[in-house]
Image: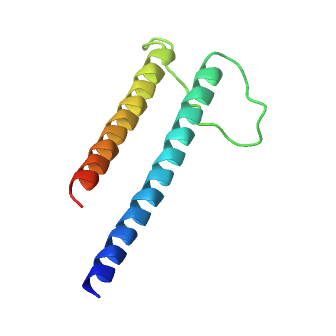
């Protein structure tokens, strides 16, 4: 009975981790899509989509809008890399400590 309770606890944790991973992946995809749409709009193109994009007005005297977007894109990639490394370390830990 004790073993079954332990297995159930780990199964629930694993299911939660998988759900969180899927949610994180969806958020990353959505954020990169919005960054890309904003880059397109900031270059003067219009999107042929039914939804409102995340475009915002930029000050002409300020830094070029593409520079801000590059930094934002890099931040997203750093977050993805950190998440991937954490998941990898957690998996290695679970394999070594049954």
Q: Percent position (x, y) of residue 88?
A: 32, 43
Q: Is residue 14 left or right of residue 94?
A: right
Q: Position of residue 76 (x, y in %)?
A: 42, 33
Residue 93 in percent (x, y) is at 23, 51
Q: In the image, is 20 to the left or to the right of 51?
A: left
At a point 50% along the width and 52% down the height, the residue shown is 22
Q: Residue at x 67, y 17 (%)?
A: 44
From this view, report whether residue 45 is shown above or below residue 11: above
Front residue of this view, candidates 21 and 33: 21
Quadrant location of residue 40? Answer: top right
* Left or right of 35 on screen, residue 4: left
The coloring applied to the image is rainbow
For residue 85, above or below residue 64:
below
Residue at image location 55% in from the left, 26% down from the top: 57
Q: Quadrant of residue 63?
A: top left
Of residues 79 and 69, which is closer to you in this image? 79
Q: Of 96 and 63, which appears nearest the observer?
A: 96
Where is residue 4 drawn, in percent x and y? Answer: 33, 81
Query: Considering the image in quadrants, where does the C terminus appear?
Result: bottom left
Q: How many marks?
A: 0
Which residue corresponds to the image point at 28% horizontal and 76% vertical from the top-left?
6
Which residue is nearer to you in this view: 29 or 14? 14
């Amino acid at each position: 009975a004790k073993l079954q309770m332990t297995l159930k606890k780990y199964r629930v944790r694993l299911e939660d981790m998988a759900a969180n991973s899927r949610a994180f992946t969806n958020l990353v995809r959505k954020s990169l899509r919005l960054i890309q749409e904003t880059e397109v709009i900031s270059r003067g193109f219009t999107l042929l989509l039914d939804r409102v994009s995340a475009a915002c007005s930029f000050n002409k005297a300020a830094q070029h809008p593409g520079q801000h977007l590059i930094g934002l894109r890099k931040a997203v990639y750093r977050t993805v890399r950190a998440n991937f490394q954490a998941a990898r370390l957690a998996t290695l830990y679970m394999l070594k400590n049954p």
